[in-house]
């Protein structure tokens, strides 16, 4: 993807550089017809304003763009945003939050909107480990710094803040096996590939104890649509029971999945934990008061949000100083496994 300049546009359209600049800044001095010609050509050729050059003229925007799946759809996301805001107050930056709704195209649209607003940097929880990789690298290399949090895309050369999902999933699965629940239904999002650390941790726990992986126990759900998600969970349980291989435990790979699963089991009159043990990633502060209290892998979400913004500010400052050689970091915070009644079996 080439980075076309104002001079390139001027040469191609036979206008002066001054005219191109004024048109792209919506100046009243340029006629609507000329503006239309210039802006359409710029858009068709992927023109993006030179952010650093603009900052020399008008100063930094002191704003940070944040892209998450949806506003406070889970306690986990709300806690991350809380950490981001705490750090933003300390450094004097404004926050612009946008939603990808677990959709790759919408994620790209969010990126475009934030760039158009002239943000100094972007914090992103990607839709998946591979979503918009080429575009993200282009933005990070040419336009503004990006820091990834929560879901980590290994192909993006930048700082990444996450949790040790592998160990969290490994420990939770080992717990289920230790209480003799080995027919584990693992429910995750359909955007997550086989190299997802939560999937790998789950599989490793099975392999360590020579428990064969039944592909029917791997359920991939559409996280964009709650009705589809609920139906997939419900139908997966019913189908497996009809085949006489019904699960006796469920592992929810995300906050949303874990919380929805507990409610669905109640609707299906499946007793937890007597008939079905339930565990999963969940950061809700009321896990202890659910019926039954939920065994959960808790992530340090506020710390993740706080650290992500602080690391992004470091990159922004280094760029402003003109430093090109930057040492990027991948930081994985530890999870905590809280065992409660949803996996507490009598006599175990």
Image (cartoon, helix red, strand yellow):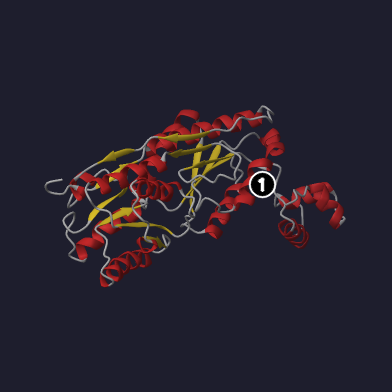
- Look at the image and tell me whether residue 28 can be seen: no
Could you say which is closer to the camera, residue 211 or residue 174?
Answer: 211
Q: Nearer the viewer, residue 128 or 17?
A: 128
| Quadrant that contains the C terminus | top left
Q: Is residue 71 left or right of residue 46?
A: left
Dot 1: few (<14), some (14–19), or many (≥20) neighbours within 10 Å? some
How far across and how far down the image is residue 333, in percent? 41, 34
Residue in the foreground of this view, choosing between 220 and 107: 220
258 relative to 288, above or below: below
Q: Is residue 194 or residue 63 the one in the foreground?
A: 194
User: Along the horizontal axis of the image, is 31 left or right of 212?
Assistant: right
Vertical position of residue 219 compared to residue 56: above or below: below
x then y, percent, for residue 256: 34, 54
Tag 1 residue: 138
**What is the x, y in percent for residue 60?**
62, 35
> Left or right of 153: which side holds 270?
left
Q: Quadrant of residue 261?
A: bottom left
Q: Residue at x 64, y 45 (%)?
A: 137
Numbered-mark total = 1
Q: Residue at x 21, y 49 (%)?
A: 343
User: Can residue 166 be seen in the rendering of this structure?
Assistant: yes
Residue 175 horizontal side relative to residue 60, left or right:
left
The kind of secondary structure element at disc 1 is helix
* Res 37 quadrant in image: bottom right
Where residue 2 appears, as percent x and y from the top left, is 75, 50
Q: Residue at x 42, y 63 (%)?
A: 222
Q: Residue furthest bottom?
A: 242
For this orientation, the residue located farthest to the left is: 347
């Amino acid at each position: 993807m080439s980075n076309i300049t104002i001079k390139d546009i001027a040469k191609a359209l036979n206008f002066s550089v001054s005219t191109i600049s004024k048109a792209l800044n919506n100046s009243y001095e340029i006629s609507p017809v000329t503006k239309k010609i210039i802006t359409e050509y710029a858009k068709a050729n992927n023109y993006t304003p030179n952010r650093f050059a603009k900052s020399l003229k008008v100063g930094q925007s002191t704003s940070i763009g944040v892209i998450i799946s949806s506003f406070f759809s889970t306690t986990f996301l709300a806690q991350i945003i809380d950490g981001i805001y705490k750090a933003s107050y300390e450094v004097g930056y404004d926050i612009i939050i946008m939603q990808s709704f677990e959709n790759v195209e919408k994620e790209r649209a969010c990126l475009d909107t934030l760039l158009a607003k002239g943000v100094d940097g972007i914090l992103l929880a990607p839709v998946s480990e591979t979503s918009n990789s080429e575009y993200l690298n282009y933005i990070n290399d040419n336009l503004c710094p990006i820091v990834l949090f929560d879901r980590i895309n290994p192909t993006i050369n930048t700082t990444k803040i996450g949790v040790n999902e592998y160990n969290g999933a490994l420990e939770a699965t080992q717990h289920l096996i230790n209480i003799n629940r080995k027919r584990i239904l693992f429910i995750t999002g359909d955007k997550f590939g086989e190299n997802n650390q939560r999937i790998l941790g789950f599989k490793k726990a099975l392999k360590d104890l020579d428990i064969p992986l039944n592909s029917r126990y791997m359920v991939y759900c559409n996280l964009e649509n709650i009705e589809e998600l609920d139906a997939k969970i419900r139908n997966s349980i019913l189908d497996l029971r009809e085949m006489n291989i019904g699960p006796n435990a469920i592992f929810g790979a995300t906050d949303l999945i874990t919380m929805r699963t507990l409610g669905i089991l109640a609707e299906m009159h499946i007793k937890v934990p007597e008939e079905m043990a339930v565990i999963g990633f969940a950061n809700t502060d009321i896990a202890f008061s659910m019926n039954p209290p939920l065994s959960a892998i808790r992530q340090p979400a506020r710390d993740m949000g706080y650290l992500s913004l602080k690391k992004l500010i470091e990159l922004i400052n280094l760029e402003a100083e003109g430093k090109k050689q930057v040492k990027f970091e991948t930081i994985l915070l530890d999870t905590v496994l809280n065992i409660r009644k949803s996996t507490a079996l009598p006599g175990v």
